[in-house]
Image: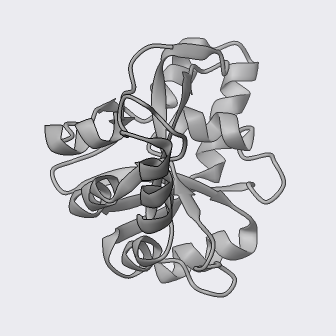
Amino acid sequence: MGLNTIRALFDKHTITVYQAYNKNIAQLAVNSQTFVSPPFKKERMTWIKPSFLWMMYRSGWATKENQEHILAIKIKRAGFEWALANACLSHFDSKLYSSYEEWKNLLSRLPVRVQWDPERDLKFNSLNYRTIQIGLSGIAVDLYITNWITEITDISDLCIKTKQVLIDGKISQAMDMLPKEETYPLPDTIADKIR
């Protein structure tokens, strides 16, 4: 598998990440413009994904149980970069950690997990680079819901429409419906930390 690459929809101040939830959690989040506990469980790790197509792959175009509502969440770039600066890979990597023990120690201490998975195309085929998933826990979840989020939009209808256009064989029209994701300019110090 090729390079680890963060591709995302972003502007000067924010980056868009995606999460999938059931109707109850999603509607309350949209109405409140943050996640409300309960039904949102702050004590659980919450995974955010900057890749729209990886989110579609994971949720089956918003059809899997408890993933029927796809939320596009704009968060502050400063928060996104804080998360990655305070992250540990979800699996041991000998090129990054001097020992398994060092990795296990960081894993227990740091509030953020990073996982790299093969990016997907419109038909969910694996691409030759990996995309990031970011797991937030503890203080990272608190910061996420109280400070980082600037806007939450339910984009489930767009997801379902895009899937239908794809089923109809209109590939170029489906491509035009996707968010315009570009390579995210992560500072080198953070990029090196998460490979």
- Residue at position x 65%, y 78% from top? 41
Q: Is residue 10 left or right of residue 188?
A: right
- Residue at position x 45%, y 49% from top? 103
User: In the image, residue 81 lies at what x, y percent?
Assistant: 26, 54
Q: How is the image coloured?
A: one colour
Q: Is residue 161 visible?
A: no
* Above/below status of 186 relative to 83: above
Q: Is residue 99 left or right of residue 30?
A: left
* Above/below status of 65 relative to 7: below
- Residue at position x 41%, y 51% from top? 102
In the rendered view of the protein, which quadrant contains the C terminus? top left
- Outermost residue on the bottom side: it is 38
Q: Is residue 109 left or right of residue 38?
A: left
The picture quadrant where one finds residue 27 is bottom right
User: In the image, residue 83 lies at what x, y percent?
Assistant: 34, 59
* Above/below status of 34 relative to 52: below
Q: Is residue 83 visible?
A: yes
The picture quadrant where one finds residue 143 is bottom left
- Residue at position x 73%, y 68% from top? 23
Q: Is residue 89 left or right of residue 165?
A: left
Residue closest to the eye, 29 or 115 = 115
User: In the image, residue 71 lies at what x, y percent?
Assistant: 55, 58
* Above/below status of 65 relative to 95: below
User: In the image, residue 48 lies at what x, y percent?
Assistant: 50, 54
